Image (tube, rainbow, N blue to C red):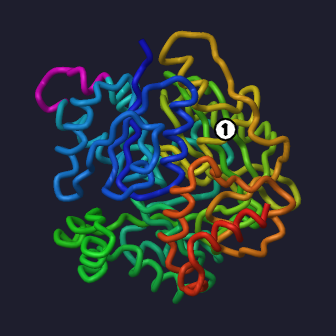
Amino acid sequence: MKPTILVATTSRWLPTARLAAAFTDAGFVTEAICPPRHPLCKTKNVHRIHLYRGLTPLASFADAIAAAKPDMIIPGDDLATQHLHSLYYQEQQAGSKTSLCELIERSLGAPDSFPIVTARAAFIKLAEGEGVRVPETEFVANPRELRKWINSIGLPAVLKANGTTGGVGVRIVQTLEEAERAFRALHAPPLLARATKRAVVDKDMTLIWPSLFRRRHLVNAQKFVPGHEATSLVACWKGAVLANLHFEVLNKWDSTGPSTVLRLIDHPEMSTATETMARRLQLSGLHGFDFLLEAGTSNAYLIEINPRATQVGHLTLGAGRDLPAALYAAVSGQPIREAPKVTAKDTIALFPQEWLRNPASVFLHLGYHDVPWEEPDWIKAAVESRKKWTSSYPHLEWNHILSKARRTL
């Protein structure tokens, strides 16, 4: 019997749908819990869809797990990871180790790691203690502590809010005044107007409770390292790295936003760092690690962990670089059967990110443009969900958009 994997997401992110399809191709029976109108609902690669309810998130996750009876759960965003942690603690309070607790441990790793992977400063401190190269990082509770830290470490600096993703909670600051403004913005709870708009227009309830209960983000200050970004995604099993993808970031949506173009690399220091932290935290599942490659030396500074799948998890890039196949082998106990490489090119332009950022980008021609042509509904959903793209091309019909996309290859 094939093992079942449950892909869990609270946001309508196309890479989560592509990852689910990759798990099916690897041999899993794939089920998903997601919000309504997610691209996952538009594919035949998922056996069954369970509805994520933003107002009762833990109940919807528990219902999906009970119905799917998965062998493993893969969170596709940070909030999904937080829900799984909360479910674990909720079950643990019952006084015994339940099957749900065992499933979450098998999916994410040792429960001792849960508070660490969601706290940026604590994670960096742990990595530093393990001998991993990291920039100085400190939790700052208020503007006074921030000023004290800046006086000691200097500027520029990077401020990051826990519990945020996609660059939303990151600010690079050059002056003390800019740092204090950024701290106030990052520390503030979500505006009720923004949360309401998300709920009514986007059917996304994730900001409602934080806004109503005035929950504030914890903010961390990190020393700025001149250089360029790199990122890794690793498949882990009980603390061992089974497969990895290491990339240099060539292009981004904006200065602090998600990557749009990546170059596949081998970097021994990045490999060592991810293996060290996976072993130290006894991680399982998919985990992303972000680095800065120092200008002039290419030294890899580990700057944070993403305790979830990232946007590259579906890419099958050869031996040791097929993450779904590696997890299938671990869960099923069968020998690994890696899929063919999707491309021989090292440079990969992610869809729809780079195309929407710049439809005339040279990377769409020079690199591998990762368009899911086998799923035209995904392409349509991705394009229609991006207001920037549709507002730039309001006169185009869908067939013209698809034709234009094909000509970029």
Residue range highlighted in magenta: 92-102
Q: x, y (%) of residue 307? A: 47, 44
Q: x, y (%) of residue 375? A: 56, 50
Q: Which of the pair 34/44 is nearer the observer?
A: 44
Whether residue 147 is visible: yes
Is 405 one of the magenta-colored residues?
no
Q: Residue at x 71, y 71 (%)?
A: 404
Q: Residue at x 35, y 66 (%)?
A: 217
Q: x, y (%) of residue 254? A: 63, 74
Residue 316 to residue 384: above or below: above
Residue 393 to residue 93: above or below: below
Farthest residue toward the bottom?
Answer: 177
Other-residue count near label 1 (Cα within 10 Å), few / some / many at <14 / 14–19 / ≥20 = many
Quadrant of the image for the C terminus? Answer: bottom right
Q: Residue at x 66, y 19 (%)?
A: 337
Quadrant of the image for the N terminus? Answer: top left
Q: x, y (%) of residue 168? A: 48, 70
Q: Which of the pair 104/261 is nearer the observer?
A: 261
Element type at marker 1?
Answer: helix
Q: Please state which amino acid type lies under the numbered disc 1.
A: Ala
Farthest residue toward the left?
Answer: 94
Residue 8 lies in what quarter of the image? top left
Q: Which residue is mark 1?
A: 273
Q: In the figure, is residue 295 to the left or right of 381? A: right
Q: Which of the pair 116/25 is nearer the observer?
A: 25
Q: In the figure, is residue 229 to the left or right of 383? A: right
Q: In the figure, is residue 293 to the left or right of 303? A: right
Whether residue 109 is visible: no
Q: In the figure, is residue 293 to the left or right of 259? A: right
Q: Residue at x 78, y 66 (%)?
A: 407
Residue 158 lies in what quarter of the image? bottom right
